[in-house]
Amino acid sequence: MQAVAAGWQLYALTHSTFQLGMLGLVQFLPMAFLTLPAGHVADRYDRRLVIAVSAGIQGAAMAVLAAGSWGHWLSPAGIFAAIGMIGAARAFERPAGQAIMPTLVPEPLVPKAIAWGSSGFQVASIVGPAAGGLLYGLGAGVSYGAAALMEFASVGFMLALRRKRNPRQGASATLSSVFTGVHFIRRNPVILGSISLDLFAVLLGGATALLPAFARDILGIGAWGLGALRSAPAIGALAMSAILARRPLGRRVGRKMFAAVLVFGLATVVFGLSRSPALSFAALFVLGAADIVSVVIRSSVVQLGTPNEMRGRVSAVNSLFIGTSNQLGEFESGITASWFGTVMATVAGGVGTLVVCLLWMRLFPELMEVDRLGIPGDADGSKAPGAS
C-alpha cells in the first residue's frame, strides 16, 4: 500500500522517472550503511524485539506520510525523508526476520516453511497494492494510514510469538564480528553464487520502479491499474509458492534456479515491449512465478548452509544483496529511463539479466551442480549446500 501510494503521489507531483529512481536510492542508502551492524544485532538480541521495533518505526513513518497528505503539506522532500526512515528500519528487520525462521520449525521443513512464508508475503503483496490503488482514490493519506495500521498490528503479532533464545556474541560489536558473515559467504561459492545472481538479475531486470510511468503514460490504466500491475508479480509468486509448498523442488535445484532467472529476464523483455494491459499483467505474473523459485532456492541455501549463531550476520549480507537489487535496481531503472526512455530501459534490463545468468553458469559451476536442498554448512564453509 505504501509503495503504490508513494510512487503514484511522487510521480503526480514531479512527473519525473528520475525522481522515481531516487525513491529507490533513498531506501537503499540506509540499508547499505546499517545492514551489516543489523546482522550483529540479530545474533545478539531477541530477534522478536528487533523485528517489532523495526515495524513500529515503519508504522510511525507511514503515519507521518498520512498526516502530511491529509494536511496538504507533504512535499517530495518529505516523501524521501519518510521513505529513508522506512529503509533504515527495514535494514534491521530483514536479517532478524530471515534468521528467526529456521528456529521456528525442524530443519528438514525449512524449505517448505520458506515457501509457505513466501505465500503469506505474496498474499499481502497482492492485496496491498490492489487495495492501495483503490484507497488512493479516497486520498493518499487513506492508503498511508491503512499501511500504518497494518505495521502497528504486526508489532503486536510479533511480540505474541513465543520467545526463542538467541546465541550471544559478546558484550559489544567489533569489526571482526560484524564482517563474519561476509567472510563466511566468500568461502562458500554456492551461497556467494546464489545471492550474487539474484543481485545482478534484479538490479538489471527490475521494472517495478517504472510501473507508475507504464500505467500512466504507456498503458493508460490509472492508479487502480498501477495497483493491478504491482499485484501481478505477487499473484504469480503466490501461485508458484503454493505449488512449491506442496511439491518440493526435488533434485537439480541449481539448474532450476538458473532456468528461473532466464525466464525472469525473458518476462521482463516481454513486459517492456507490451502495449496491452492484459499482456503486461501476464508477463509480470510469469516474472513473479519465476522469481519465487529463485527466492526459495536461494533462501534455503543460505539458511540451511549457515550455523544458527551466525544466521543474523549472514542474513544481513543476504539482505544487503536483496536491498541492493531491489532499491538500487529501482534507482538504476529510473536513471536509464530518463536517459533512454521507459521502454528501452526495461527491455535493456531484461536482456542484461539474460547475459548475467549465462555468465554466472560459467563463473559458479558449483551452483549449477547443486542437486538437493537441505545439507547444512559448517562454520568454516567446509560443507556447503549441495556437497556430497
Image (cartoon, rainbow, N blue to C red):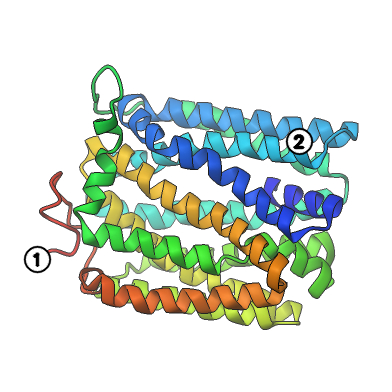
Residue positioned 76% across, 35% down in the render: 78
Q: How many marks?
A: 2
Q: Where is mark 2, residue-wise? A: 78
Q: Judge whether 18 appears above or below 369 on screen.
A: above
- Disc number at residue 88? none
How far separated are the C-alphas under marks 2 and 1?
53 Å
Q: Position of residue 192 (x, y in %)?
A: 29, 58
- As drawn, is 107 to the left or to the right of 320? left
Residue at the far top: name it: 171
* Image coords of residue 351 (percent x, y): 52, 79
* Residue at image mark 1: 388
Residue contact at pointers 2 and 1, CB within 8 angstroms:
no
Mark 2 residue crowding within 10 angstroms, few (<14) / some (14–19) / many (20+): some
Tell me the SS state at disc 2. Answer: helix
Q: Quadrant of the C terminus?
A: bottom left
**Residue placed at 64% from the left, 72% from the top?**
345
Q: Residue furthest front?
A: 339
Residue 160 visible from this viewpoint = no
